[in-house]
Image (spheres, rainbow, N blue to C red):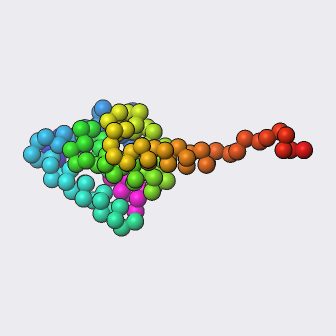
Amino acid sequence: AKQPLSSPGTCRGQVTCPRTRARHVPQANRPFFTALHLHAAGLSQRGCPAAALAAATLLLSLDRSDPTSVLLWLDSLALRAGRPHLLAELERDLPVAASLPGWAFSAALAARLAAAELPAPSDPSSAA
């Protein structure tokens, strides 16, 4: 890649970190973006959703304009990888994500999964 892929900072591993960027615009960076996109797709097809999610979030963190359209399938990767809370974070940090097809369904499913993980409140009237 023409530009450095990472720089030291406190926001390590965050998708929306402004310190870690590599633009898709320079011709020298495009093969790297294509290779990373195909790698994430291949990992997803091989049944490795957590690794595919990591590669896809890396791709999104490098260029938030999403030149490879990874946001179109990032929601399903997050659900399959067991990380539904990532959808709420992305929706908060990237408002355009909520307007994508299928995102509303994935967000609702993520909310249901998050509610299922919480312990049920104890009912004092049923304790007797």
Q: Quadrant of residue 14?
A: top left
Q: In this image, 28 relative to 117: left or right?
A: left
Location of residue 74 in the rendering, given as x and y in whole percent from the top left corner: 36, 49
Above or below, 81 relative to 84: below
Seen at 53% across and 43% down, the residue is 111
The residue closer to the viewer here, 99 or 23, is 99
Answer left or right for 126 relative to 11: right
The chief SS type of the magenta part is: helix
Residue for point 45% across, 39% down: 88
Which residue does the image show at 44% across and 47% down from the upper left?
Answer: 105
Q: Determine if residue 27 is in view.
A: yes
Residue at point 84%, 44% (across, down):
126
Image-based side of 11 in relation to 122, left or right: left
Name the quadrant of the C terminus.
top right
Residue 109 at x, y = what percent? 50, 48
Provide the residue span drawn in magenta.
48-55
Q: Is residue 16 visible?
A: no
Q: Is residue 118 magenta?
A: no
In the foreground, 108 or 58:
108
Residue 93, horizontal then vertical, whole percent: 38, 33
Q: Residue furthest right?
A: 128
Answer whether residue 54 is magenta in the image.
yes
